[in-house]
């Protein structure tokens, strides 16, 4: 097939925009090619598929809005963005601008996907199956995001027109059935290794997401305490497949990925995030970015890298507006630095003596690879900027993320990809599932594979993070909490925190928020960029944006 690697977004078949006072989704052709013309050739279909990915990774979805809203609202990050103050306080309103833009971006993505499905199905083209596999996979991914974020939303299975802008919400049961159906179709239709464009998801990505769906349902259903009004989706309500136990179903899907997918951990954790590291052996689903002129698509550099830090090109714009909360850095140091913090809940901060100096042969290498801390020298003037834990007051009193670095960053676009799913995540999920089914003894090997890679460096193997066994992680309850923290250490800054904070029910969410509140009190930082989170029971999900309520007569939340 010719020109299969066309630039994403070269031709978008149908753009979706909000028009009139109703601000609803309407399809308007934006170029001289009709849908019939575009979908009549394999190249045209490939361009339409590119359009789906362009929407998914665009600024109003994974490129920026998802991060700007969900990261601070997770309870694990702090944002300097004034427009996001309500989310930053864990009290998001339905007029939040990032919420509104993200909602629109997600439905624009759904609309582009449905356009592909409707036009490609039955076409008889050579790339019909591959294209439909990608479309069903992406629709499953987007609706999985939607149901976790809003619980109940409309189901749209065709391109939206002015005749169906008013549509009621579907139930969680209906949504999860659609998600599972789409992902199962994708698992059958997506290509295997070597059969398609490098960097695009393989069939195993659908199995991996299916496992995440089952784990989400299982974890919420088995939570000892849950959010007000929680309504579980049971196995019997999944009509797209015969399911008897969500944990067992997750195990089946994860084992299939592990045994057949051909993925492997990179040699070191640092290999994942070094300059120009793209689509490694660990990557399962990775959004592909590059220099695309003046159009901002992925704002990760602006959002997380502090101003004039050496990990980006000198003179380029970055704000470092999203930073891990103090306890995120403190917990990782206490757990895995190798220093003795017996009886200590939080590391001390605010004095020169509080500088963290890690023993490079002992401490978890992920600490240095994940965080910018203590201080750094600005590339524009050589001035030293003090950060947490040297700084405990003011705007700089936080560590920053270090995973995203790009000397080719031009102030607008970056060559950094964004990883939605990688193999270490799968191994940690498999450990979590095994613990729930059989207890910790047979779960240790899965997590220990991740820990071995974590402590491996280019020059040797550090002491931390040490393997888990019956001595240090002795029982199912301890394992359950430790594996969630291990996900935090391994996947920090990769977009999982909002979902992980909520999928184990209200009890764990409250415990984590209480830990944050205790940190704010310990560092005496309330009102100084830090917040005490209160009345968090309602923050399991987001409200439907006011613009949607105003424009859709069948939604009145």
Image (cartoon, rainbow, N blue to C red):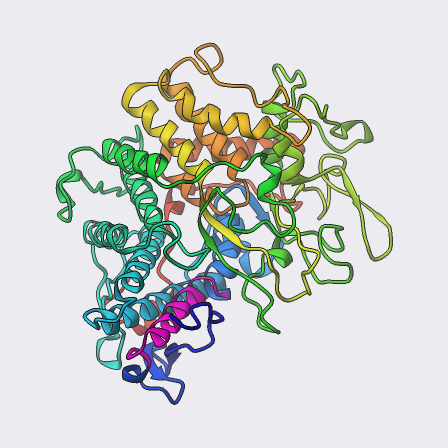
| Residue 532 in sight from this viewpoint | yes
Quadrant of the image for the N terminus?
bottom left
Q: Quadrant of residue 42?
A: bottom left
342 relative position to 281: left or right: right
Taking the spot 27% from the left edge, 68% from the top edge, the residue there is 126
Quarter holding the C terminus is bottom left
Pick the front one: 481 or 62: 62
Q: Nearer the viewer, residue 125 or 548?
A: 125
Is-magenta flag for residue 52? Answer: yes
Residue located 61% across and 15% down the image: 343
Q: Is residue 182 left or right of residue 205?
A: left
Residue at 72% in and 46% down: 396
Farthest right residue? 382
Residue placed at 32% from the left, 36% from the top?
Answer: 254
Residue 191 falls inside the magenta stretch: no
Q: Position of residue 164 (x, y in %)?
A: 22, 75
Q: Main secondary structure of the magenta part?
A: helix
Residue 28 in picture, x, y percent from top left: 35, 83
Asked where in the image residue 258 lies, by quadrant, the reply is: top left
- As drawn, the residue found furthest toward the bottom would be 32
Q: Position of residue 272 (x, y in %)?
A: 57, 43
Q: Who is closer to the viewer here, 300 or 431?
A: 431
Q: Which residues are magenta?
A: 38-58
Residue 86 visible: no
- Left or right of 527 in this view: 60: left
């Amino acid at each position: 097939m010719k020109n299969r690697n066309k630039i994403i977004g070269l031709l978008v078949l149908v753009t979706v925009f909000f028009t009139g006072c109703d601000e609803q989704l309407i399809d308007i052709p934006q170029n001289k090619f009709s849908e019939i013309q575009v979908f009549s050739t394999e190249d045209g279909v490939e361009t339409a598929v590119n359009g789906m990915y362009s929407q998914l990774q665009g600024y109003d979805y994974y490129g920026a809005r998802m991060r700007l809203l969900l990261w601070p609202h997770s309870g694990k990050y702090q944002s300097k963005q004034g427009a996001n103050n309500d989310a930053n306080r864990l009290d998001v309103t339905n007029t939040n601008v990032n919420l509104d833009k993200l909602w629109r971006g997600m439905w624009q993505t759904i609309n582009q996907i449905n356009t592909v499905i409707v036009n490609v199905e039955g076409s008889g083209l050579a790339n019909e199956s591959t294209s439909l596999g990608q479309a069903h996979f992406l629709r499953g991914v987007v609706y999985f995001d939607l149901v976790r974020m809003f619980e109940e939303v409309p189901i749209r299975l065709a391109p939206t027109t002015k005749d169906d802008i008013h549509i009621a919400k579907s139930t969680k049961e209906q949504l999860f059935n659609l998600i599972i159906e789409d992902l199962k179709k994708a698992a059958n239709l997506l290509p295997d290794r070597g059969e398609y464009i490098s960097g695009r998801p393989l069939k195993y990505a659908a199995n991996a997401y299916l496992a995440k769906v089952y784990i989400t349902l299982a974890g919420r259903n088995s939570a000892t305490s849950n959010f007000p009004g929680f309504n579980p989706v049971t196995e019997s309500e999944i009509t797209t497949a015969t399911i008897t136990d969500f944990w067992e179903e997750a195990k089946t899907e994860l084992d299939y990925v592990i045994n057949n997918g051909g993925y492997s951990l990179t040699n070191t954790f640092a290999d994942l995030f070094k300059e120009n590291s793209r689509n490694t052996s660990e990557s399962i689903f990775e959004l592909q970015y590059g220099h695309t002129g003046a159009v901002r698509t992925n704002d990760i550099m602006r959002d997380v890298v502090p101003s004039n830090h050496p990990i980006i090109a000198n003179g380029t714009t970055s704000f470092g507006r999203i930073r891990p909360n103090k306890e995120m850095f403190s917990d990782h140091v206490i757990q895995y630095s190798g220093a003795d913090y017996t009886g200590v809940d939080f590391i001390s901060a605010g004095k020169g003596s509080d500088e963290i100096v890690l023993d490079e042969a002992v401490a978890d290498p992920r600490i240095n690879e994940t965080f910018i801390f203590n201080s750094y020298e600005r590339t524009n003037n050589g001035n030293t900027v003090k950060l947490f834990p040297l700084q405990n007051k003011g705007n700089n009193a936080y560590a920053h993320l270090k995973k995203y670095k790009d000397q080719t960053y031009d102030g607008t676009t970056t060559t950094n990809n964004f990883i939605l799913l990688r193999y270490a995540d799968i191994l940690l999920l498999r450990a979590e599932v095994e613990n729930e089914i059989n207890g910790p003894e047979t779960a240790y090997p899965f997590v220990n594979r991740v820990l071995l890679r974590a402590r491996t460096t280019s020059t040797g193997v550090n002491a931390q993070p040490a393997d888990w066994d019956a001595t240090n992680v002795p029982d199912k309850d301890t394992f359950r909490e430790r594996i969630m923290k291990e996900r935090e250490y391994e996947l920090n800054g990769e977009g999982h925190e909002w979902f992980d904070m909520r999928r184990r029910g209200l009890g764990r969410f409250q415990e984590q928020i209480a830990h944050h509140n205790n940190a704010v009190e310990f560092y005496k930082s309330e009102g100084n960029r830090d917040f005490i989170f209160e009345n968090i029971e309602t923050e399991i999900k987001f409200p439907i944006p006011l613009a949607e309520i105003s424009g859709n007569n069948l939604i009145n939340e």
